[in-house]
Image: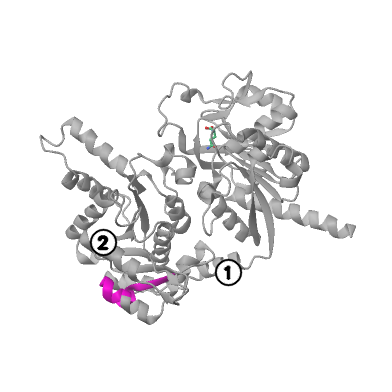
Amino acid sequence: MDTKYIFFTGGVISGLGKGIAAASVGALLKARGYSVTIQKFDPYINIDPGTMSPLQHGEVYVTEDGSEADLDLGHYERFIHTEMTKRNNLTTGQVYHRVITKERKGDYLGATVQVIPHITNEIKEAIRKVSANSKKFDFVITEVGGTVGDIESLPFLEAIRQFCLEEPRENRLIFHLTLVPYIKSSGESKTKPTQHSVMRLREIGLQPDVLLCRTSKKLDIETINKLSLFCNVTSESVIEARDVKSIYEVPLMFHKSGVSELIQDKLGLPETTDDFSDWKEYVRKIKHPKGKITIALCGKYNKLVDSYKSILEAFVHAGVDNSVKVDVKWVDTEELAGNEKEMLGNVDGILIPPGFGKRGVEGKILAARYARIKKIPFLGICLGMQCSVIEFSRNICGIKDANSSEFDSETRAPIIDFMESQRKIRKKGGTMRLGAYPCTLKSGTKAAKAYGKSEISERHRHRYEFNNKYKSRLQKRGMVFSGINKRDNLTEIIELKNHPWFVGTQFHPELKSRVFDTHPLFRDFIGASKKYRARKENRVSKKT
Ligand code: GLN
């Protein structure tokens, strides 16, 4: 079949969950046997989010091929299991960079380079390129970041208008995600914001085929008919997207509303069936855990859920495997010194997430120490692993000045040091050790047990690494180097002997945890935390 294109636009306000909606539609199509990929357009000028603060932009997602990408790509991979590549995220910065590079080469043969057609051509090419040659998909879903009416997103929407002119009608659909607010005082759902945003879309030549309406209340038939009439869509194409507790319920909700049939019908595809029972079962497990545990997330972008998106989702997945709900206790490491017992005394596991810069680091080192001494299950990711190694060097190996040259460039004991290849790099964008690298596991370790194999591949985003000069001293005192990149002799995983579960990874396991396919380290970390809690509860019940 020809590749079919679905465009996701957003209206009224941002933050309605366009990424989740796009990923959910992707999951529906996968369940019907189609191959699907999803692409995100980000209208900002940065080439990628790699240089942006997580406070501005949330987590930076890293793809297998080493691009730093929008966090929505994480949702796409988690929901549809299709591997994202650098082609799946396009920013205004990239588009202009490509066009200007061509102009400097003289590729435009004397033409005046303009938004239309040069910028829009580049965007259309990017839509077609995600499903090209060897990697042809049945469906390409393209999510346009921002909301209709933003100046920045205009060239993208204009490119989509032109694209729709070029593609036959049965090959493309436009979804519009909008808000239908419920006004308590009058007891009504209001359609005007949606009418206005669809009006803006139509002004630029795009007629939505399907409206996805975010709402807190069930939409009554009058509201649906009104939306249909004023927005020029059939009433079957007005889909209610009620607020739900878990993002993993969204595909189920769309499935129930008949979105799969709607898409097949609109694109003239033969109607097939599916029972979606795996998703139903998954959501049931999320909603009915048998117990709960608390994990301390010891970071500095505290409570900013978006900064640690993939970690929080990996907790949900690992919770399903272990039949527990994972509650997160946000621990601001700048506040930890002197308050360890109060802040960490009651938790069942400690996770130190990735991070950059010196602020809050000494608190992270304290958290690693607390986990080691109290034998609380521990997972340190990237910076978290580096902190645990510094802690061990200082407090067990007697290397008092142990530090990372990231925090003290003059340190006499650079346990964590610049990677050789990073020393001369001055440019910040896209220059870290990025993307997938192989790693060999040592048999008999917790890592080998979790993965159940010895050769793995994981994604990276860092400039510093463990300094092998110190390896034998740490090994002698009980640190196990359980994962190594053999080619470059880099430490990828460390663990501790004499501890129920203490693992640090230089890579980011959270980026590869998916629905139905939890990352093994998260699965085992949450499993160990569950055991830790059970032992604690046992001790208490014996005492009383
Ligand atoms: N700042 C550290 C480094 O660059 C850790 C990075 C991370 O946690 N992703 O090596």
Q: Find residue 411 and report its image quarter.
A: top right
Query: Which residue has dot 1 on it?
Result: 284
Q: Where is residue 56 in the image (x, y as percent from the top left)?
A: 45, 44
Give SS at disc 1. helix
Amino acid of disc 2: Leu
Does the numbered disc 2 mark a residue whose Cβ is under 8 Å from ligand 1?
Answer: no
Residue 17 location (% of width, % of height): 43, 59
Q: Quadrant of residue 398 in the image?
A: top right
Query: Magenta part of the protein: which range?
Result: 227-241
Q: Residue furthest left?
A: 110
Judge by depth and name the residue closer to the eye, 362 or 79: 362
Residue 484 versus residue 136 in the image, above or below: above
Q: Which residue position is annotated with label 2?
A: 201
The residue mark sitting in front, 1 or 2, is 2
Left or right: 445 as drawn, with respect to 77? right
Whether residue 73 sits left or right of residue 522 in the image: it is left
The residue nearer to you, when weighing 145 against 82, is: 145
Residue beneath the point at 75% across and 54% down? 533
Real-space CA distance between mark 1 and mark 2, rounded to the nearest whole angstrom = 38 Å
Measured from the top left, where is residue 407 in percent x and y? 58, 27
Is 232 colored magenta in this rendering?
A: yes
| Callouts 1 and 2 close, C-beta under 8 Å | no
